[in-house]
Amino acid sequence: MIIRVRSNVGIWRVTVSDTASPDDILTSIQESRPHVAYETPLCSDPACQIPLDMNQSLAAQNLKHGSMIYCKVDPSTCVEVSAPSDSTTTVPGGDETTARTTTVPASSGNVKRVIDADGRIKLVPIEGDASNSGPDRGFRKGMMALRDIKKAWTLNEFVALDSQFEFKLQRQPESICQKVSLDIPSTAQFQAYWQRLSCTKRFGILYGHFLPASNDPKETKQMVKVEAIYEPPQRPDQDAAEGFEQLEEPLESTVEQIANLCGLKKVGWIFGHEANRRQGMTMTAAEIIMAAEFQLEAAGGVEETPFCTIKVTKGEDGNVSVEAFQVSQQCMAMVAEEALEIGLDESVCQVNETFTAIQEGKESKTVENSFFLTVVPIVQHTSETFISQFPKLNRDHDTSIPSKDELKKQLSKSGTQGWTFMDLLSDFNLLIYLSSILDINTDMPKICHSVVNREIPLEEGYKIIIASIAGMDSAY
């Protein structure tokens, strides 16, 4: 099965057996990155707070094909090390004093990334007999030759192996998520800022709940209820396939921790779609693949999940529309296998040459993006727990930014127009900002618990401390 390891330098795809343990994942990573220095162990959560049990199998820890696990590493130790022939190279560490010398074995591809003697990475051709090595000798493009895998093969064994690389395309008739309820203030503010950016690409993460789709106690189908939106660091990039560049996220673990304290989880993502798209194209190939990555992360593998995608776009008439989608489970499976790629035509997903996609009985090199999409109905609500008034983090062109002055401006409304101090404190982005001042492990749990459950009063001392941070004489 395939396990995806998300580190702070990217996502690594690791193939292991069904009975593998976390140690097997580390061993597999070490084959191509022998000098990785882990700052945190392998964990089951994005905040790297819940380490995997190294003594239990992956299956025993509910990790399946396509599951995502997490770790933090020293970026300077993560270069893939290979060379055209056995040679001695210098692998850079954190500084010159920690640089190491290693002997790198030969590899059999046409070109490989290698670390030169001066520590630079470069591509070099692989020397050797092309008739006995290289991608064209594999049973599929880019794969090993059959005899390199096993000496003898039966027909049934070969068919079973080959079938793992074949997808018979089937349209998913309906979405797993029965409906999504969007928080009106949060969605409106995301939309307004996106329009101020001249409708260039922007995305945010939806936090909320997965709930039963109806009041029927026997109901098994689920819906999404969005309570807040967080916009990670990013900047528009027309040269990027996604239309934006995701920047380093120093607050990732903080945001996840605040969400957990508030009883929230990632339930979807929202993006502003450029207006100048080809008519009839709902989502680009890059957006399809990104949506599948998010669903795989939410489901812990190729499993059912209500996690949904919200698209905001402006039509030719100037009116803004909001639509909700999911990608099919087959799309999730193909992305988990890295069978789908982004090509020159953004209206289709390219099929990686190692794989075969069968559509209507014929092999297809591309798949129309709309084939993978299912529509999710949208309803609206205004959150009963959270407000959305505090300036949003990571907005470079907004009229206001998170600050103590903005904290004072918001909390000073206490006692006016029906607002209470706790009402005004119950703002997801405000809580994230406040966690940069107060202790997230001792102070924020008490504050967040009082936000979520108003029957748990916030201690008067915390109200005084928060008011003092804001520069207020009183808080209530």
Image: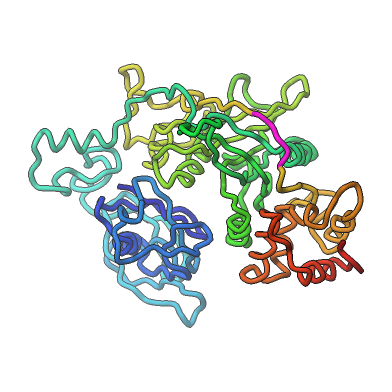
The structure residue drawn at horizontal position 74% and vertical position 52%, both measured from the top left corner, is 427
Where does residue 286 sit, x and y in percent of width and height? 53, 37
Task: Count numbered badges in the picture.
Answer: 0
Where does residue 10 sit, x and y in percent of width and height? 49, 55
Quarter of the image for the C terminus: give it: bottom right
Residue 381 among those drawn in magenta: yes
Where does residue 332 sit, x and y in percent of width and height? 42, 37
Q: Is residue 133 above or below residue 333?
A: below
Residue 327 visible in image:
no
Q: Is residue 283 above or below residue 75?
A: above
Q: Is residue 90 above or below residue 112?
A: below
Of residue 76 and residue 425, the one placed in the foreground of this image is 425
Q: Main secondary structure of the magenta part?
A: strand
Of residue 261 and residue 348, the one placed in the foreground of this image is 261
Give the residues in magenta. Answer: 379-383
Q: Is residue 268 above or below residue 90?
A: above
The structure residue drawn at horizontal position 26% and vertical position 50%, both measured from the top left corner, is 18
Colour scheme employed for the rendering of this structure = rainbow
Q: Left or right: where does residue 134 sit relative to residue 413?
A: left
Of residue 167 and residue 356, the one placed in the foreground of this image is 167
The structure residue drawn at horizontal position 61% and vertical position 55%, both measured from the top left corner, is 259
Where does residue 224 sit, x and y in percent of width and height? 58, 37
Residue reaching furthest to the bottom: 97
The structure residue drawn at horizontal position 32% and vertical position 34%, both measured from the top left corner, is 355
Residue 73 visible in image:
yes
Of residue 400 and residue 368, the one placed in the foreground of this image is 400
Report which quarter residue 66 is drawn in: top left
Residue 319 among those drawn in magenta: no
